[in-house]
Amino acid sequence: MKALATIKPVPGKKGVWEIRFDTEDPATGKRRQHRRHFTGTKPEAKEYLVKIESDILKGEYNVDMEQATVREYLEKWLKEYGKPNLAYRTYESYSGTIRNHILPSIGGMKLTALKPAHIQSYYSKMAANKEDGGAGLSGTSVLYHHRILREALSHAVNMGYIPYNPADRVQPPRKNKPEIKTLTVEQGQYILTKYRDHMIYLCILIALKTGMRLGEICGLRWQNVGLETGTISVTHALQRQNSILTLKEPKTKKSRRCIPIPSSLVAGLKEIRHRQKQDKLSFGKGYDTRGFVCAWEDGRPFDPKYVSKAWAKIVRDDNNIPDSVRFHDLRHTHATILLSQDVNIKIIQERLGHESITTTGDIYSHVTPAMQQKAVNILEQVFAQ
């Protein structure tokens, strides 16, 4: 196709340019005129037109997307880009957010007509209380919507469907600071004593003494446990994908880590290892030989959902444990106890597998004031006059 193009200012709209260009269908020889509005400077409008002309000459310009709605584009993006490139759980999460929130609100608009103001209004609606006609979502949730839209619309820019990313020109909401709920040392000791014979005791023990995530605990195999060296190598997490439990590698390099563990945990692991060897003899060929540490009598791994539900029942039935504490909060308990004992935050970052030390500091900022006061007290003692 070959393009014949013009750029003219739109009367009464400062900084808005009307771009017109023709395309020729190589099969029929017929020409078709296209019109776009571009907001920005004239040089930017020319640069956008040059890209269109280049795409047309290379046969990469998609004429059909000119009339596409946001719904049609996002469904296309999910199918052609999202499914092949995103992790399964990320794809499912993106799909659900797009289907349940984004499409009902702005899905009917033309993609080329989507402006920053439309997206800003959408964010405001999502954040507004339900009594006021909004969705009542938290800032963190709306920020997640922003992340999805920005990523999808960035792809649309790269494909030449739109001149710029309208999500880049919107002020995203602030992320809510998570409320950290933890157990006290005494509560942790109580749980480890009372629930020693519970089916998920080992999961609780590993969580409290390593800070590992639930999926990492359920995905732990004996090949990654150093009983002689006193270490655990975190290499995979167990996730449910299409109703099948699957081992997945961590998203980041930092999540792959080797954790030194206390001797009490080594002793607990040795006990479980011995019991599993006996179970294997009992079950014979029916035993799952993949070597999962937290497993049923036949060697099958615990489903993370099962562990979560079992923990929830423990908390619900035991008045000595705060009913708001989730299994994931055992990880927070691990980190908070270490911080309160003046363990270097860099060490804690490495144990938790956070990508950066900033992440660790932001999450556990509630502990740092006490640490700062300890530092002040030490300085007072050192430089006492």
Image (tube, rainbow, N blue to C red):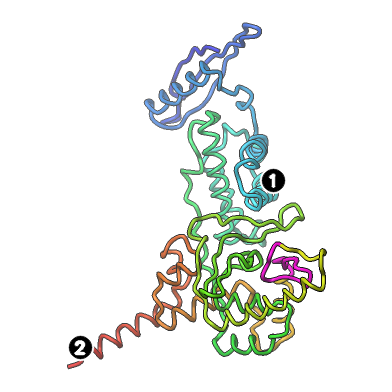
Spot the residue most to the bottom.
Answer: 385
Place residue 356 in its image quadrant: bottom left
Q: Earlier in the sequence, mark 1 or mark 2?
A: 1
Mark nearer the viewer, 1 or 2: 2
Q: Residue at (57%, 51%) from the top-left corner?
A: 123
SS state under label 2: loop
Spot the residue most to the top.
Answer: 29
| Amino acid type for the residue under numbered disc 1 | Pro
* Image vertical order of residue 9 relative to residue 118, above or below: above
Q: Residues within 10 Å of mark 1 (few under 14, many from 20)?
A: few
| Amino acid type for the residue under numbered disc 2 | Phe
Q: Residues within 10 Å of mark 2 (few under 14, many from 20)?
A: few
Magenta residues (range): 290-306
Q: Residue at (62%, 11%) from the top-left corner?
A: 25
Give the labeled residue for mark 2. 383
- The percent position of residue 132, horizontal first and vertical second, equals 64, 59
Place residue 266 in its image quadrant: bottom right
* Image vertical order of residue 1 relative to residue 182, above or below: above
Q: Residue at (56%, 57%) from the top-left corner?
A: 250
- The percent position of residue 318, horizontal first and vertical second, equals 71, 87
Measure the alpha-carbon separation of dots 1 and 2: 65 Å
Residue contact between numbered discs 1 and 2, judged by CB atoms under 8 Å: no
Residue 104 badge: 1
* Image vertical order of residue 372 relative to residue 42, above or below: below
